[in-house]
Amino acid sequence: MSKNILVTGGAGYIGSHTVLQLLLGGYKVIKMVGIVGISLIIDKLLLVQRGNTLIIKQSYWVVRFDAVIHFAGLKAVGESVEKPLLYYDNNVIGTITLLEVMAAHGCKNLVFSSSATVYGWPKEVPCTEESPLSAVNPYGRTKLFIEEICRDVHHSDPEWKIILLRYFNPVGAHPSGHIGEDPRGIPNNLMPFVQQVAVGRRPALTVFGNDYATKDGTGVRDYIHVVDLADGHIAALRKLSDPKIELAFNPTSYAIIGCEVYNLGTGKGTSVLEMVAAFERASGKKIPLVMAGRRAGDAEIVYASTKKAECELDWRARYGIEEMCRDQWNWASKNPYGYGSPESNGVMK
Ligand code: WQD
């Protein structure tokens, strides 16, 4: 019997790719679209997002959810520094509300969208799941706080089975070219910005720093194909329904069985200039560059150890940066204004 999965933030970049993979994998998906002002009725469960606070008014769930994948949340680092309370309200309070409603309806299986941002500026790479954690901005702190909340919830009630997935740098798009990344406003992240330069929406890419102790002086990250990331969630759901997971909680050792964290990356570091070159090869477009100083808060080198996910989730990334750039260009060239239009992006004809 296929499982019923509630996906919060299912209309977002990673959420939409995960919903697609879930449907292809035979899951029944109920998608909660966390768009401000949208009230959504899911089988008598009224989910209302007012302002940035997710208010879940529960009546009763007609559909019994087997698990929840929780993507919904704000994720712009710079915005989180300017508006911390907005991020704590939306990301942390929203998650607490969700956990309360899940418990009230007897659904205690959760996959949570965490982030490599919890590693801050790692002193050692690759980052393992045991690497020191140090969020360096309010957005990263919301992820850290939510991870701790999940550990405490499991500690209080071992019936909870929770998997925390720490994403490294998601890029690319579904090979169909029908869905992809479409950030609002000026893209914070590297690849959506490169994508917009390639389609002519922006004149050049500003490279933030070329004096790092890296192969070419530019920042190094672990870029992962968004479809690999989506498949990592399927692997996590399989793990949650794995009968071998012991629920026994051994109080003498806080070694949590039933609340686990996994890195989702490729285990490879790629520099800014290497990513730009790969995208130029994939698109046939020249990406003009403006070299600038370092961006405040940026780490030098961040990439994942993926051993734990390979071993315990039987998951590994399949795609390299060439496929990431190929699929990102396929989406961008077919959808130069994302899901919008030139007019909706302020381009007058
Ligand atoms: C990557 C590299 C920049 C833009 C982000 C989020 C974080 C997490 C992972 C969700 C860096 C350089 C970037 C540009 C540039 N996401 N760059 N010019 O900072 O590793 O982390 O993704 O959880 O929350 O912050 O990714 O894409 O912003 O930067 O030179 O216009 O590209 O300096 O070296 P980052 P990024």
Image (cartoon, rainbow, N blue to C red):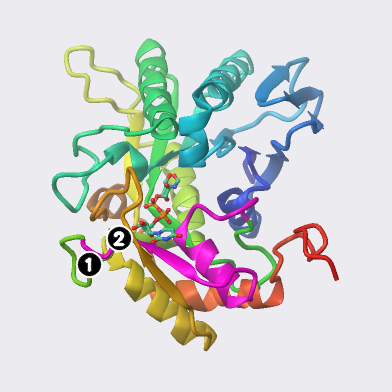
Residue 110, visible in the rendered structure: no
**Magenta part of the chain:** 183-211
Residue 53 in percent (x, y) is at: 66, 22
Q: Residue at x 57, y 72 (%)?
A: 203
The residue wearing badge 1 is 217
Q: Amino acid at mark 1?
A: Gly
The residue wearing badge 2 is 209
Compared to residue 52, the image places residue 153 above or below, namely above
Residue 221 in percent (x, y) is at: 31, 59
Name the secondary structure under disc 2.
loop
Q: Residue at x 38, y 64 (%)?
A: 207
Asked whether residue 57 is drawn in magenta, I would say: no
Horizontal arrangement in the rendering, residue 184 relative to residue 60 (left or right): left
Q: Pick whichever of labels 2 and 1 is earlier in the sequence.
A: 2
Q: Quadrant of residue 86?
A: top right
Q: Amino acid at mark 2?
A: Gly
Q: Which residue is outermost to the right?
A: 349
339 or 104: nearer the eye? Answer: 339
Compared to residue 174, the image places residue 137 above or below, namely above
Compared to residue 105, the image places residue 316 above or below, namely below
| Marks 2 and 1 close (CB-CB < 8 Å) | yes
How many numbered marks does the figure carry? 2
Q: Residue at x 48, y 37 (%)?
A: 111
CB of residue at label 2: within 8 Å of ligand 1? yes
